[in-house]
Amino acid sequence: MKIGILSSGGDCPGINAAIRGVGKTAMMHYGMEVIGIHNGFTGLLNNEIEVFNERSLSGILNLGGTILGTSREKPFKKLLHSDKPEKANIIRENYDALGLDCLVCIGGNGTQKTASKLAAIGLNVIGIPKTIDNDIWGTDITFGFDTAVNIATEAIDRLHSTASSHKRVMVVEVMGHQAGWIALHAGMAGGADVILLPELGFDMEAVNNAITKRAQQGKPYSIVVVAEGIEVPDKKRTAVHITKAIEKATGIESRETVLGYIQRGGSPSPFDRNLATRLGGKAAELIAQKDFGKMVCITGNKISSIPLSEVAGKLKLVTATDDLVKQGLKMGISFGHE
Ligand code: F6P
């Protein structure tokens, strides 16, 4: 059998571990031919390919990013006023011309949705979930998330000393798109006093009261962790908006830090390396069994698979009943409500 592997959407630590996992297992355990497709679906449109051999996949386990490159190409996005064959048809033609038996798509929600649509027009497809956001339906956790939480937590740890020295409020903005998973896990691990999540909303007055109350209790500094997806007037200045509102209302000097792309950089954590490797191996197994149209996943620490059609278009979001939310509330951590 001959398979093609691509990575699509935002990069994250662990993609190379997944490429290595599916590629090496396919070649060494199942005797398959493996080609790498560069730059996500753009590469399949333009036949930007590389024939892999074992050496191609050596020394990449601990590398951040993706050796294949990525793009945010959405081949099913309607081309306005175009009479050209849809990009998806070009992809199908190139998939056939390459003689592929399966296309492995490593990516987030958008990628899995595209993978599901490619399966629906007749391609053999396997999805491998990846994102620091941890918001993909059908899997307990995605690789990239653990590394991002480690990075964000270390940053928050470092902010305690400067906040304490200056008796300031430090507001930290983390990524996560529409989900609050990174903010919740890094906020709780980093000992934040206030954690604001898109899923739970927030009342600015309640946030200010929580910080004022801490000051009155002799706790002169606070750490506030906000997810980038919370509702503020200007989405591009989330942390600035919250910081200014706090300083204005409480009179306490406040400063913001936006972690941004640092959360997606560098070497994957050991957990992410092994999760990506396990998922890659499962993908190769499904291909060998000709069990296509699936996304590999982990549920209850068991590696499994779920139909792509059940994943496409859904998001996995934080709920008020999440254990960490309930535990935080019991310890007086504010989630933005009285
Ligand atoms: O999906 C991963 C992610 O880092 C999100 O957390 C973030 O909102 C988005 O990608 C940023 O997208 P881009 O890399 O296109 O700026």
Image: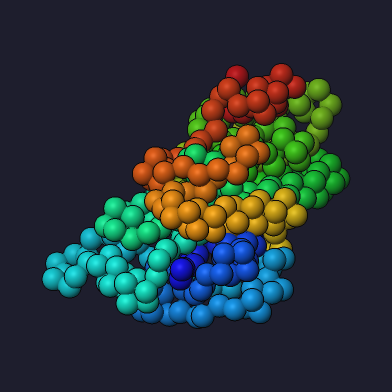
Which residue occupies 45% across, 79% down? 49
Residue 187 x, y percent position in the rendering: 69, 39
Residue 222, placed above or below residue 312: above
Residue 295 x, y percent position in the rendering: 47, 49
Left or right placement of residue 316 versus residue 22 in this view: left
Left or right placement of residue 242 versus residue 150 in this view: left
Q: Is residue 270 visible?
A: yes
Left or right placement of residue 45 versus residue 168 in this view: left
Which residue occupies 72% across, 65% down? 62
Q: To which quarter of the image does residue 73 belong?
A: bottom left
Viewer-side residue, 154 vs 159? 154
Residue 162, placed above or below residue 310: below
Q: Is residue 15 visible?
A: no
Viewer-side residue, 191 vs 123? 123
Q: To which quarter of the image does residue 281 belong?
A: bottom right
Residue 183 x, y percent position in the rendering: 63, 41
Tag count in the figure?
0
Which residue occupies 52% across, 48% down? 296
Q: What's the colour scheme?
A: rainbow
Residue 170 x, y percent position in the rendering: 71, 44
Viewer-side residue, 298 vs 331? 298
Which residue occupies 68% across, 71% down? 60
Q: Quadrant of the C terminus?
A: top right
